[in-house]
Amino acid sequence: MLDPFTELSITLANPEVTLPDFFKAVCVAVVKIIPNADRVSLWKFSQDKSDITCLALRVNQEFSLPTSVVYSSKRYPEYFKAILERHSILAIDARNHPDTSCFADSYFESESVFSLMDYVFENTFSPFGIICCESVGQYAKWGETEVEELKRIARIVSIFSNIRHLCD
């Protein structure tokens, strides 16, 4: 049996894999690797990095490709500043964390999100997307190990996104 990182790499390397299956493989790998990742989503930055658009979402083993889910840096400046400067956010108490509390009323409350961990996808050291993990109904016990694992997934995705020109 293959470890989830190898399995993800093999799946993404297959040129026959459709884009929806590419996204689904990433979300499934995150769920296998990151404990309490109840919601996993993939996002793409606009060219000027002022917005992010949801590409894929996995919640409760249900996978979807949402349309028209966009968040703007004008509405969530703290989050955008943090993710673009540091390339990662670990917010165990997402509703009260300085980088993510901007989502508390508009999103976290309605979806029962307690913890968030995000990491960027990069192309030539420039962010082009985000992988987002959220813990629903409870605080996650994520730490540096989980951040490193999410970083590893993001690097795998970045490599194959470049090949597929998803970062264009």
Image (spheres, helix red, strand yellow):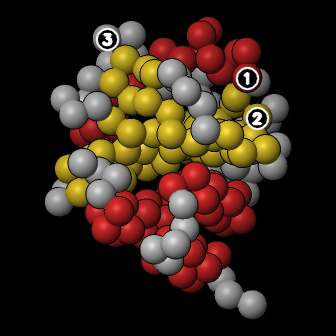
The crowd level at tag 3 (other Cα within 10 Å; few <14, some 14-19, many 20+) is: few
Relative to 121, 24 lies left or right: right
Secondary structure state at the residue bearing disc 1: helix
Lower sequence index among marks 3 and 1? 3
- Dot 1 amino acid type: Glu
**33 or 50, nearer to the observer:** 50
Q: Secondary structure at mark 2?
A: strand
- Quarter of the picture holding the N terminus: bottom right
Question: What x and y, as percent, mark residue 46?
Answer: 28, 31
Q: Residue at x 70, y 28 (%)?
A: 113
Residue indicated by mark 3: 74
| Residue 158 appearing in the image | no
Identify residue for label 1: 111
Which dot marks residue 136? 2
Instruction: Mark 2 or mark 3: name the one nearer the start of the chain.
Output: 3
Q: Point out the frontmost of discs 2 and 3.
A: 3
Q: What type is the residue that disc 3 sits on?
A: Lys
Question: Residue 82, located in which quarter of the rendered image?
Answer: top left
Q: Is residue 127 above or below residue 163?
A: above
Q: Measured from the top left, where is residue 117 in percent x and y?
A: 54, 44
Q: Are marks 1 and 2 in contact (CB under 8 Å)?
A: yes
